[in-house]
Amino acid sequence: MDATLVMAEAQEGTVPLAEATLKTLAVARKIGAGPLDIAWTGTSLDPLLGQARTLAGIRRHLVFDDPRLTHPTADVMAALVGDLVRDYSHVLMPGTSFGRDVLPRLAGRVGAPAVSDVLEVLDPRRFKRGLYAGNVHAVVRVPDGVPVLLTVRLASWRPVTAEKEAQPAGIEKREVPADLPTEARFVGLERDASARPDLQSARRVVSGGRSFGSRENFALLEGLADRLNAAIGASRAAVDAGYAPNDLQVGQTGKIIAPELYMAFGISGAIQHLTGIRDAGTIVAVNKDPEAPIFKVADFGLVGDLFEVIPALLAELERQGIAR
Amino acid sequence: MAPMKILVAAKRVVDYSVRVRLTPDRTGIASDGVKMSVNPFDEIALEEALRIRERGEATQVVVATVGPPEAESQIRSLLAMGADRGIHVETGRETAPLEVAHVLFRLVQEIGPGLVILGKQAIDDDCGQTGPMLAALWDRPQATYVSKLTLSEGRVQAVREVDHGLETVELVLPAVITTDLRLNTPRFIKMPDIMKARQKPLEKRPFDGFGLDLPRLTVEAYLPPPEREAGLRLESVAELVTRLHDRGVL
Ligand SMILES: Cc1cc2nc3c(=O)[nH]c(=O)nc-3n(C[C@H](O)[C@H](O)[C@H](O)COP(=O)(O)OP(=O)(O)OC[C@H]3O[C@@H](n4cnc5c(N)ncnc54)[C@H](O)[C@@H]3O)c2cc1C
Ligand SMILES: Nc1ncnc2c1ncn2[C@@H]1O[C@H](COP(=O)(O)O)[C@@H](O)[C@H]1O
């Protein structure tokens, strides 16, 4: 019997629901394999469940609420849901650092292959995904006889919206075993304290590369980001040089994003970077080298020095009265 | 502490600088004359293992690859970088992460390493699965996307690059680590070391000898991704703002 389990992004009782989870639900609906359950793990989940109850088309909410699950490690997650996943033909997780850490561990435990970063669903067992930094797409088929275990490439999907359902799904509190694995211990999380929109869900992103030359110069992007209510992104070279924190890296090994507007300042456009912005709505490139590869994918290109263009841009936004 | 061994897993992949193309009949990737290299994350894995050994915290670094006969060239370069010995599990076909994880698990059982270090992903299949799968089979803790490692008294502290910043976890050894780009910068190989590496032990084993029969994904088609077209070159910032405004993105 088909049944689908979505494992939600681990939560600390935050509302609204994580966009990553809502996008994973969109994929589950597209697959349409049997009744759909969601597993929530975290602590103080009640406010969140209040929200979750308004999601349509869910059979059950399985709730693992325990202070030890505030920052669950992959071994704990696998121990927690390892037996549960055997009841499902499909198990989905978001392609976040959490989902990518946990899902393959579950697959190893279950003895099934996993499909990473699904960008399209063709049927309940056939999916499209990217290879070689997205330069090739492949249609892969999960063989019969094993569950379908996958992570979702978030930039390819739109979140489902909460709709009031006549009969909200049941909430089932699940027992959290007393003897969870203890050999991996969460020590701490150093968070970027910025109040800017989140890079992965922002509608606009302004991004900078190595060419800024220093952390102080990189801060030039902040004025523009504030003006446009944009998130800040960075090339790997800019992160390596210490101009921006690691969680702002865009690309094959950073974040894959799909904002409505992506503005790249002084970024050459290496394939590894372009992988991260393929699905952006409009790409703007500002680079002083007219041959820079970024221009090949840019909707609007401006050859120029970023140290002149950024101030000019701010002045022009002011002049035309465009803000936020 | 007992003398610790480290196992490093490394894959032969198309070099990161190559712009990969499909064969004209679209049955696979055009590979003729294409430059092949060690997966960049795996060089970082080996570099970290070597540094741990050089600090006296490990005694032996073993590097293992599953791949075609030609992968000997990559494993030799890893020996030249400083690995003590190599294991080359030979196969003529593409292997999947679950298969590689099973092979590595067998090697783990033979070698008894305190740490296994892999790359966070292979830049050809971009799966990012092998490390966590191995950790599951072995039933040991894992830390993925690691950008800093510190060993002390049977434990390892790892800083992980996660979506919302940097997470620190502590694992009891033995454990599985996967590397992120900022963990270290791999050393260059010196000419004399290439010569010396020819003398280092390199064991060959047939993949078929592992007797694995695991479920695998099948690839039904390879497709080119939708291309983005180059758009307009603009002359001024004013024009840019106007265009973006007209498009409704500003
Ligand atoms: C395995 C692997 C994974 C990788 N993953 C990623 C990834 O996820 N994301 C990523 O970004 N990279 C990644 N890279 C690195 C990638 O290959 C490039 O090296 C990197 O993207 C280059 O960054 P950059 O464009 O900032 O720097 P550069 O390539 O040095 O380009 C700087 C650009 O700035 C321009 N410029 C200089 N001064 C000015 C000025 N004053 N005004 C305007 N323009 C100026 C130059 O013309 C040039 O085009 C990866 C590499 C490897 C090997
Ligand atoms: N064929 C292979 N031989 C040796 N190591 C491999 C192989 N495939 C994957 N690995 C290891 O697993 C990591 C992740 O690969 P993947 O799960 O394919 O993205 C790589 O960085 C390697 O360390």
Image: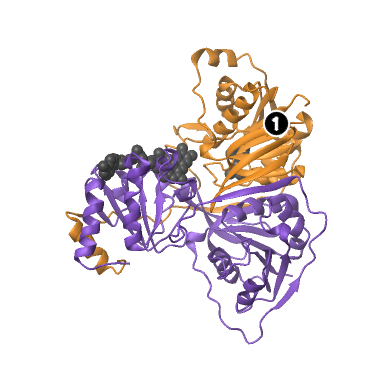
| Residue located 62% across and 23% down the image | B83
User: Residue A22 sits in which quadrant?
Assistant: bottom right
Residue furthest to the right in view is A178
Dot 1: element: strand
Q: Residue at x 76, y 65 (%)?
A: A87
Q: Nearer the viewer, residue A154 or B10?
A: A154
Which quadrant is home to the N terminus of chain A?
bottom right
Q: Residue at x 52, y 42 (%)?
A: B124
| Quarter of the rendered structure image containing ligand 2 | top right
Q: Is residue A154 above or below residue A3?
A: above
Decide if residue B30 is in sight here: no
Q: Say few, some or many: other residues with alpha carbon within 10 Å of mark 1 (under 14 / 14 to 19 / 20 or more).
A: some
**What amino acid type should be assigned to the residue bearing mark 1?**
Pro
Q: Quadrant of residue A63?
A: bottom right
Give the residue number, with chain letter if any, for mark 1: B206
Q: Is residue A65 above or below residue B197?
A: below
Is any part of residue B6 visible from this angle? Answer: yes
Q: Quadrant of the C terminus of chain A?
A: bottom left
Question: Who is closer to the viewer here, A204 or A65?
Answer: A65
Does residue A172 appear to the left or right of A53 in the view shown?
right
Supply the letter of whichever chain is purple: A
Q: Position of residue B71 (x, y in %)?
A: 58, 29
Q: Which chain shows up in orange?
A: B
Q: Residue at 72% of width from left, 27% of height from top?
A: B5
Residue A99 drawn at (x, y percent): 61, 56
Dot 1 falls on which chain?
B
